[in-house]
Image (cartoon, rainbow, N blue to C red):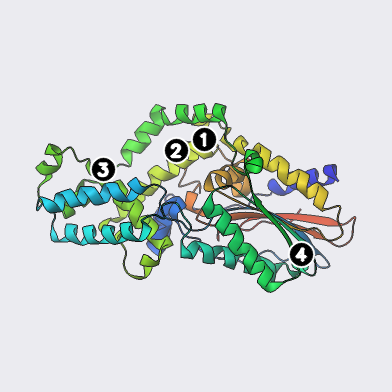
Amino acid sequence: MVKLYTKLLVSAFALCMSVAVSAQQAREDFRKDINLSASGYKAYPGPQKALTPAPAGYTPYYISHYGRHGSRYLIRPADYDKPYMTLRKLADAGMLTEKGLEVFDKVGQIREEARGREGELTQLGAEQHRGIAKRMFERFPEVFKGKTNIDAKSTIVIRCILSMENALLQFTSMNPELIIKHDASHHDMYYMSQTDSVLKILKKQGTDTQEFKDFSDKHRGGVRVVDLLVKDGEFLKENKISRHRLVKQLFDLASNIQSTELRHKFSMYDLFNEDEVYDFWAGSNAWWYVNYGSSPLSGGVQGYSQRNLVRKIISEADSCLALPHPGATLRYGHDTMVMPLVCLLNINGYGKQMPLEDLDKNGWLNYRIFPMACNVQFIFYHKNDQDKLFRDAITSGATSRSFS
């Protein structure tokens, strides 16, 4: 079984879908949906393409999965406190324009909603994983019929645990006979959320390169936006308030609104023009490529941070495929796992190496890889015990894969 599965796995990963892109695909995408510029803060877009139908006579019989937690609040209290306190200082000094006062009020509302919930799953995040589970059940009913097993694991982070529990609640509502085992333990963190000190050093070397620094400097912004908010720029200098830092903090808040219930009330994207939106995204895109992709600047090996996860996927599949009705193995973790996993397996060509200036035109677009709740599903089909097919799919709403 090991040899059969490994052969299928390698051949399926080699079938990378070609993606036609323009010189600046991201700009075109942002004109259609500015929320995409949020990179990893993008809320799960839902299915946008139908899956490739299975060949005649084949039925799904096992699923192996790794998914990111659903939409969350920003991680640290400082993500909310710092921009709020800066704007409050400006407001107290009478330095905010009418637009500045409007933004100050919005930031206050965002901060209040997130108070004590930093890094936690939002209501939308829970809904995303219930929806993903529902679609998985409806697309592959043969996998989940009867008294079959679901083995679910989560990292020890609460947003991941709650993502898992929301998915499992959806599964049990659709089939109460399911036999579910679920766990979140330090025991499994070596593959559920692996760290690697050697790769961490290479990351630092990558972001210290002149190419990365030049690219980041090229895509810095903030002067124009601050002028919309503040009456006197000299006050910023006198009080050592960084324009770029403030505007980056505001852009992060604007990006995260889509994951909260405040998305029904207001937006903050109106602060930024098209070039500013693109620059903030491009800087983030390059950062993710260097830190978690196959960038030669960081050794071209960052995907290997997921070597233990890949080994676990293979070994658990080998064991499960020996069962008459294996069910599903589900894992709930983080963007820092999904991104390098996709790159390591070269799904849709995301394992390619290229200069930072070529990322956009070559279709290396981070919002297509790891929005909130993104997940990679490995679907196994069979006609009989000897006739088996394998398909993998990255279900961030953008792509699906073919069979091998």
Q: In this figure, which residue is indicated by the disc labeled 4?
A: 143
Mark 2 and mark 4: span between their CA atoms? 42 Å
Front label number (1 vs 3): 3
Nearer the N terminus, badge 2 or badge 3?
3
Residue closer to the observer: 7 or 21: 7
Q: In this figure, which residue is indicated by the disc labeled 2?
A: 356
Q: In this figure, which residue is indicated by the disc labeled 3?
A: 244
Residue 271 placement: quadrant: bottom left
Marks 2 and 4 close (CB-CB < 8 Å): no
Mark 3 and mark 4: span between their CA atoms? 51 Å
Horizontal arrangement in the rendering, residue 122 relative to residue 380 (left or right): left
- Which x, y percent locates residue 270? 27, 61
Nearer the N terminus, badge 1 or badge 3?
3
Instruction: Give amino acid for label 2.
Output: Leu
Marks 4 and 1 close (CB-CB < 8 Å): no
Can you see residue 12? yes
At label 1, counting other C-alpha atoms closer than 10 Å, the crowd grade (few under 14, some 14-19, many 20 or more) is many
Marks 2 and 1 close (CB-CB < 8 Å): yes
Mark 2 and mark 3: span between their CA atoms? 21 Å
Instruction: Give amino acid for label 1.
Output: Ser
